[in-house]
Image: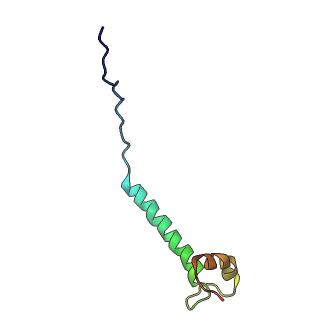
Amino acid sequence: MSQSSAAPLAPAVELPAIPLLQIGTWVVFYGLLAMLAIFFVSADQGAISLPAGNAVHEWVHDARHLLGYPCH
């Protein structure tokens, strides 16, 4: 009797199709959301501050220091 040294064949793996249009839509949405968040963290209480007062500044105070933005 002779033994075969060939390895058993692995089942074929089919890769799923990736809908690039749907992924691109979410990438744009979350990119804009991130830009808005960075705007409020970095530019609040500056020359282009949207809300009046100190409320947003106090909410993002620690994030400003973490990202290296001077605030006082």
Left or right, 61 with reference to 30: right
The quarter holding residue 49 reads bottom right
The quarter holding residue 40 reads bottom right
In this view of the protein, which residue sits in the foreground, 72 or 31?
A: 72
The percent position of residue 21, horizontal first and vertical second, equals: 38, 57
The percent position of residue 26, horizontal first and vertical second, equals: 46, 60
Going 36% across and 29% down the picture, which residue do you hit?
A: 11
The percent position of residue 28, horizontal first and vertical second, equals: 44, 66
The percent position of residue 70, horizontal first and vertical second, equals: 61, 86
Left or right, 24 with reference to 42: left
* Position of the N terminus by quadrant: top left
Going 30% across and 23% down the picture, which residue do you hit?
A: 6
Relative to 10, say whether 36 is above or below. Answer: below
Going 56% across and 84% down the picture, which residue do you hit?
A: 43
Relative to 43, say whether 14 is above or below. Answer: above
Check the image and name the residue furthest to the front.
Answer: 2
Left or right, 31 with reference to 1: right
Relative to 12, say whether 47 is above or below. Answer: below
Going 33% across and 26% down the picture, which residue do you hit?
A: 9
In this view of the protein, which residue sits in the foreground, 65 or 47?
A: 65
